[in-house]
Amino acid sequence: MVFAVRCPARRCRKYMLVEAADRGTVVTCLICRTPIKVPAEPEPEPELEVLDADPAGLPPAKPLPPA
Ligand SMILES: [Zn+2]
């Protein structure tokens, strides 16, 4: 399994895919060669929203009439 870590360099900020085995180690950014510390725990990605639940209060969607 791979996951993304973000380069801390201000002018880079690229996401790098690292292997789960790299957790707790330091990888080198392929773009700017800044060392990136890989967190031991996978970080939640705030830019990806989980849409597995409907917001409360919305009426159920009506089925489309047959065309
Ligand atoms: Zn970088």
Image (cartoon, grey):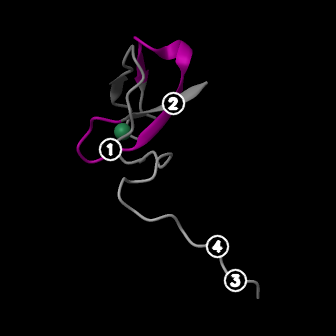
Q: Is mark 1 within 8 Å of ligand 1?
A: yes
User: Disc 1 marks which amino acid?
Assistant: Arg
Image point 64% across, 73% down: which residue?
63
Real-space CA distance between mark 2 and mark 1, rounded to the nearest whole angstrom: 15 Å
Of marks 1 and 4, which one's residue comes earlier in the chain?
A: 1
Q: Residues within 10 Å of mark 1 (few under 14, many from 20)?
A: some
The answer to whether the residues at label 2 and label 1 have Cβ atoms under 8 Å apart is no
Distance from Cα at disc 4 to Cα at disc 3: 6 Å
Tell me if label 3 and label 2 are in contact, CB under 8 Å: no
Q: Where does the magenta region start and end? A: 7-27
Q: Which mark is residue 63?
A: 4
Of residue 67 and residue 28, the one placed in the foreground of this image is: 67
Front position among marks 1 and 4: 4
Cα distance between the residues tagged 3 and 1: 48 Å
Per the image, label 3 sits on a secondary structure element best described as: loop
Number of labels in the image equals: 4
Residue position for label 1: 13
Quarter of the N terminus within the rendering: top right
| Discs 4/2, front | 4
Q: Is residue 47 left or right of residue 10?
A: right
